[in-house]
Image (cartoon, rainbow, N blue to C red):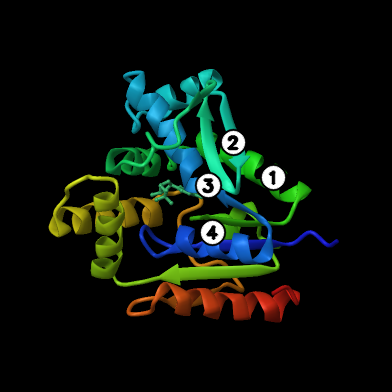
Amino acid sequence: MKIYSIAIDGPAGSGKSTIAKILSEKLGIIYVDTGAMYRTVALYCMENGISTTDGKAVEKALDDINLGIEMTDGVQRMILNGRDVTSLIRTAKAGQGASDVGTIVAVRDKLVEMQQKMAQKTSVVMDGRDIGTVVLPNAEVKIYLNADVEERAKRRLKDFSAQGKTETLEAVVEQIKQRDHNDMTREYNPLRKAEGAIEIDTTGMTVDEVAEAVMKIVYEKTGEK
Ligand code: DC
């Protein structure tokens, strides 16, 4: 069977992980959530008194970080130095920390190499900020998801309240704007639409509608359905 890759990029809350999970189930391929890897590096820093904006200190800490990724029943679990941190990385603080460590060249180089290795062995749908541009520039399918910031904040708010966390819409809008700015203006491999990527503005679309639109593109490019 031929190995193929689907790259999904876009800003925070654009629906990447929701759509990637649906594609992974429908197509029977592995979903790799690369944001979780940056979040895990950030968590290590937060737990060990290392500032996520201190490039030198974070680079040094990389030697002490053993990052494991386990797939259990299609769910990606993040293992940090032998400890399962899958749920601990799902906080706004870890998201911001991930955006900070994502500006550091040594961090990106290490994680990108791991991601490329995963996609060599098996078909994947991978989401992040630099998948179509850097990690898998030859991916058969490249998608760029977008939506207006209010809608993205409302989706994040839903995720947070499902986890029992209370945040205001205004606070989440601000967090997202800050993160977008950080991710789009960093010097090394910033978030941008890859050459050949198909952009979908998901504002006002249901999950089913977006999934259907993306599946149509996948079918056209790969023949898979
Ligand atoms: O997708 P997410 O919200 O879990 O990602 C958290 C942060 O990690 C994001 O704001 C920027 C960084 N990131 C990155 O720089 N490159 C990726 N491929 C994935 C995430």
For disc 4, the marked residue is 21
**The CB of the residue at mark 4 lies under 8 Å from ligand 1:** no
Instruction: Estimate the x, y position of residue 177 in percent, counting from the top left.
Output: 26, 58
Is mark 3 in CB contact (under 8 Å) with mark 4?
no
Relative to 76, is 28 above or below? below
Foreground mark, 2 or 1? 2
Q: Which SS class for mark 2? A: strand
Residue furthest toward the right? 1
Which numbered disc covers residue 34? 3
Within 8 Å: ligand 1 and the Cβ of disc 2? no
Q: Nearer the viewer, mark 2 or mark 4?
A: 4
**Residue at point 26%, 61% (across, down):** 153
Q: Residue 133: which quarter of the image?
A: bottom right
Task: Find the distance from the CA under tag 3 to the CA under tag 1.
Answer: 11 Å
Indicate which disc, 2 or 1, sits on the residue closer to the N terminus.
2
Q: Which residue is mark 2?
A: 69
* CA gap, disc 3 and disc 2: 10 Å
Q: Secondary structure at mark 4?
A: helix
Which is more N-terminal, label 4 or label 2? 4
Residue wearing tag 1: 118
Q: Does residue 170 appear left or right of residue 196 in this picture?
A: left
Marks 2 and 1 sit apart, C-alpha to C-alpha, by 10 Å
Q: Is mark 3 within 8 Å of ligand 1?
A: yes
First along the sequence among labels 4 and 1: 4
- Residue 225 at what x, y percent from top left? 69, 74
**Mark positioned earlier in the residue sequence (3 or 2):** 3
